[in-house]
Amino acid sequence: MSEQARSPRERYREQTRSEAKRIAVEQLAASGPAGISLNSIARSMGITGPALYRYFAGRDELLTELIRDAYHDLADAVAGSVQGSVRRAPATRLREMATTMRDWALAQPHRYLLLFGTPVPGYAAPEETIGAAHRTMAAILDVLAELAPPELATRPRRSALDRQLAAWGERQGAGHLPPAVLRRGLAVWSRLHGVVSLEIEGHLGPMGVDGELLFRSEVDALIAEPW
Amino acid sequence: MSEQARSPRERYREQTRSEAKRIAVEQLAASGPAGISLNSIARSMGITGPALYRYFAGRDELLTELIRDAYHDLADAVAGSVQGSVRRAPATRLREMATTMRDWALAQPHRYLLLFGTPVPGYAAPEETIGAAHRTMAAILDVLAELAPPELATRPRRSALDRQLAAWGERQGAGHLPPAVLRRGLAVWSRLHGVVSLEIEGHLGPMGVDGELLFRSEVDALIAEPW
DNA sequence: CTCTTGCGTTATAGCTTCTAACTAGAGCAA
DNA sequence: TTGCTCTAGTTAGAAGCTATAACGCAAGAG
């Protein structure tokens, strides 16, 4: 708590900002990204519309912060799950991590969609946000490194995808991981995202399929997949 | 061409409607769903805003038609690919079908996201749209049925997911397919959606990963996956 | 204790969706 | 061909949005 409360003014400012964001998330949940309105947020807070422009440069900046927050939240949840399950069996850890991710998404679909749904037009991911995304991936890789068979490190086959992933790994300080683990990490991410987003967007409903069952089946397949 | 040209008026009406939709898709591509404006579409067409309300009950109806059209387009593309590759090896057919899907999405990401991105608030999938979605799935299943080993039909194991899928299969007149094929169909759909949507939304860019390579890797895994 | 700085105000421009009321003209029917 | 109907377009306007400008007040900074 060393950087907070720099001054009463700063404190107050931060408080108003976060209340505005809280209400924005409510509106997001109620009527999607398009339903977020600075004007009506201000009204909810008992101030006039233009007053909010002292706190946010505009609607886009508010949106961007919501995205930023969501990225960090999700990364915290996933990394927390992985951290909390050290000492358990690797397959169990992967299952738990996956479940954490899905639960996070199901609990707040609108926020998940803010990250992985239709990109909001004026938004370009800032460095820091990318960092949070990579933190999530790092957690996934943590578990996978443990799940992978030991002899994997000696396997030399390097495809083009492997090289791209290796370059990313270097930049992220995960250069020590075998290519196959990185590849599997990408597969985990994209498959989990596939099931979760289909479920959240309601595409499974009309088929009468329970999202959780499909999800479990996909996670099982990931664990069973040969290296 | 028996139902078209019922009357000059009807013809003209249909023509204006489709021009409006054409412009709407342009706007969609340029600035996302939020950028679609009846007013500015009208302006583009050389008429005033309210005039368009003779053709569409409101913005939501226009949006809904764009979604409807996109569903049918995608279904046509996928079904067409599957139809066109009869006589080829099943694995090749699957690969081609998958590529068709990805190409369709890459060629018009905004339209893909209209279907599989953040759901538009006021929109509830009408029966007919669901039909198009199921047509896509039917095409996938067509290929998979051929790819599956013959002895599969004799395998009795029926999970809860299998039962849900079987019920859907009955309703769709695909009751003859083995449960494992239906399950695999769901996996194909969700995995393809996973990679494609990550790529389209630009999540692979910051990692330096080429979407096509990841895509191929996932398709290969699907083909190699044991039954 | 003064003075700066920041928060909130109102007013306003320009955009949006969408309704209401009206006009002109195109197509249909006798 | 004549006459009627109905449709597509018009303008006007309400209500809402983002965002900027100009102004006052009050609280923290020094």
Image (spheres, coloured by chain):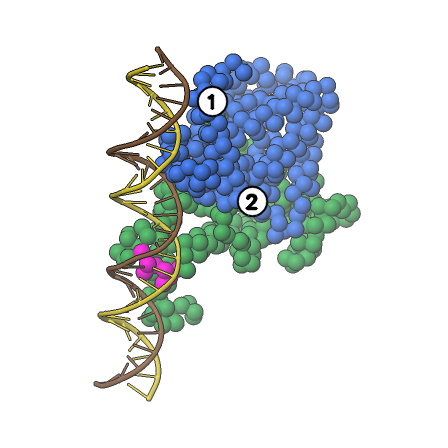
Chain colours: A blue, B green, C yellow, D brown
Residue occupying the point 54% across, 16% down: A1
In front here: D28 or B155? D28
Looking at the image, residue A147 lies above or below residue B223 = above
| Chain name for mark 1 | A
Please tell me which residue lies in front, B175 or A118. Answer: A118
Density class for disc 2 (Cα within 10 Å; few <14, some 14-19, many ≥20) is: some
Q: Quadrant of residue A101?
A: top right
Give coordinates of residue B151: x percent, y percent. Answer: 74, 46
Locate residue A198: give its quadrant. Answer: top right
Magenta-colored span: B49-56
Amino acid type for the residue under numbered disc 2: Glu
Residue lying at 66% horizontally and 38% vertically, measured from the top left: A215
Q: Residue at x 66, y 48 (%)?
A: A209
* Comparing labels 2 and 1, the label whose residue is closer to the camera: 1
Q: Is residue B45 magenta?
A: no
| Neighbour tally class for label 1: few under 14, some 14-19, many 20 plus, Cα within 10 Å | few
According to the image, label 2 marks what residue?
Answer: A201
Please give the residue where the numbered disc 1 appears in the rendered image: A11
When the figure is inspected, residue C27 is found, relative to residue A200, above or below; the finding is below
| Residue B62 location (% of width, % of height) | 42, 55
At a point 78% along the width and 47% down the height, the residue shown is B156
Specify the quadrant that holds the C terminus of chain A.
Answer: top right
**B165 in relation to A123, above or below:** below
Q: Main secondary structure of the magenta part?
A: helix
- Residue B117 can be seen, yes or no: no
Residue B69 is situated, as x and y percent measured from the top left of the image, at 46, 54
Query: Residue B55 magenta-drawn?
Result: yes
In the image, what residue type sits under mark 1?
A: Arg
Q: Nearer the viewer, residue B223 or A116?
A: A116
Labels 2, 1: one chain: yes
